Image (cartoon, rainbow, N blue to C red):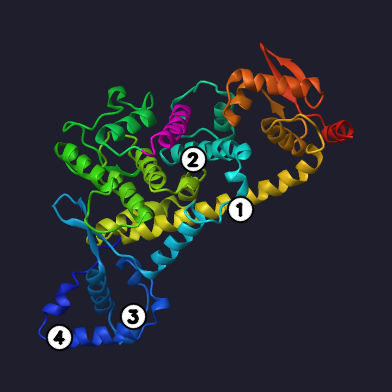
Amino acid sequence: MRTPKTPPPFQNIIAEKDGADRFSKIWMALKAIPPASTKYFHWDNLRFRTPPGGLTHEEWWCGLKFERMGASRNVPLKDKTGKHFVFNIPDLVTELLHQIDRDGGTLIQIPEPVTNPAERDRYLMRSLIEEAITSSQLEGAVTTREVAKKMLADGRAPRDRSERMILNNFLTMRHIIEVKDEPLTPELVLNIHRRVSEHALDTPDAAGRLRRVDEPVDVSDNYGRVFHVPPDASELPERLAVMCDFANGKAPAYFIHPVVRAVILHFWLAYDHPFVDGNGRTARALFYWQMLHGGYWLFEFVSISQIIRKSAVAYGTAFLHTETDDNDLTYFLIHQADVVRQALLELHAYVARKSKEMRTGMTVLNAVPDLNHRQIALLAHALRHANARYDIAGHAMRQGVVYQTARADLLNLAARHFLEQRKSGRTFVFISPADLEQRLRTTGH
């Protein structure tokens, strides 16, 4: 990642002696551009594009800045000089917000399996595991997805820091769902940080507390290039209190769309960087809290980190575009709103795919008497994965039930010869037989 070019001082054009005439020319050229073709370019992108109406790049930038300033709104977040951050809602953001409202749990187009109590726990567990893994990988965790998923599914204790980060994220996301209706307080923010970072920091006592003045931090790459230096640690308690007021809707004194508020909260925590480490994971956890707090309940099942990880450079660039262009949060808002849209599309596609698979398996399973929804979910998976291995702890984790209930499920399936029970060390494993479909059909008839 590189630091974007800083925009030129657009006010210089107006200050020149022919500034009024030049500005009139700029304004007429901009008015001739069809609104649908207008994108929210940063100077770093705009300088490589052809200006409209014979303008210079500097004139084009000057006109865009005046348009944006006239429509921008302040938020309580301030930079290190005391200047407010601002945002706009251009047409492309309005469209993204509509798509998120439509697909994100506030309107009616919700995947049926997610609303079905018998299925929702399975989808919830899948999303929690996915978000825990990818959010940790964004912060440097190196464990493979397969190993991490097995650790979480089996309930195994983490073996190293990477696995600890993933387990912490998983448990924190479950906690976020539990506290989504509570107001955000500094204590809750510190508690969330403690949960994501405990036993995973170079400074063990830094979990759950703000960084001190003798603990300078910055955002830099492996080559030592510094991209961001956060506010001084002495300001953090006050800044944290203001951030919580913003998250709770106490400020500012005008309506902010819940998704916009969640994105700004994400940026805010990352900008202030109030902790020695674990800021990114905490920022994304707060985004989830804000979305769930705002009524977007489907976000229990959505993973944004898997989308961010696919374009990690664009994620970082969105932060830098904001900081290098007069604290304009619109760049980060556009990026994150699109991330949210993509994450929702991925969820809907996943649910549709799994629903189709389930319907195929249900034709056989519905004919089998006395199966509960957990056993049906496991057998539906087993029908597609011959020789798959299941154990009691993993089944309990995936279905969100206690060990005894999971044990009863699997022993019952083994007794009915739908799974083959074997001993592995001190525990039992259960194997899906290659002829499972035939066994189910025979029983069903």
Q: Are marks 3 and 2 in contact (CB under 8 Å)?
A: no
Per the image, label 3 sits on a secondary structure element best described as loop
- Above or below, 156 against 123 in this view is above
Quadrant of the rendered image containing residue 401: top right
User: How many numbered marks, from 0 up?
Assistant: 4
- Residues at marks 3 and 4, CA–CA distance in whole angstroms: 19 Å
Q: Is mark 4 on a helix, strand or loop?
A: helix
* Residue beneath the point at 58% across and 45% down: 115
Magenta-drawn stretch, dominant element (helix, strand or loop): helix
Front disc: 3 or 4: 4
The mark closer to the camera, 3 or 1, is: 1
The three-letter code of the residue at mark 4 reads Ala
Q: Assess whether residue 28 is covered by the magenta stretch.
A: no
* Label 1 CA crowd tier, 10 Å (few <14, some 14–19, many 20+): few
Mark 4 or 2, nearer chain start: 4
Give the percent coordinates (x, y) of residue 223: 33, 44
For the residue pair 277 and 250, the one nearer the viewer reads as 250
Q: Nearer the viewer, residue 409 or 205?
A: 409
377 or 153: nearer the viewer = 377
- Is 179 within the magenta? yes
**Residue type for callout 3:** Pro
| Residue 405 falls left or right of residue 339 | right
Q: Name the residue under label 3.
A: 51
Mark before the other along the chain sequence, 3 or 2: 3
Judging by the rendered image, the residue that carries numbered circle 2 is 131
Residue toward you, 24 or 53: 24
Question: Of discs 4 and 2, which sits in the foreground?
Answer: 2
Q: Mark 1 points at which residue?
A: 349
Dot 3, how many residues are within 10 Å of its Cα: few (below 14), some (14-19), or many (20+)? some
Q: What stretch is highlighted in magenta?
A: 163-181
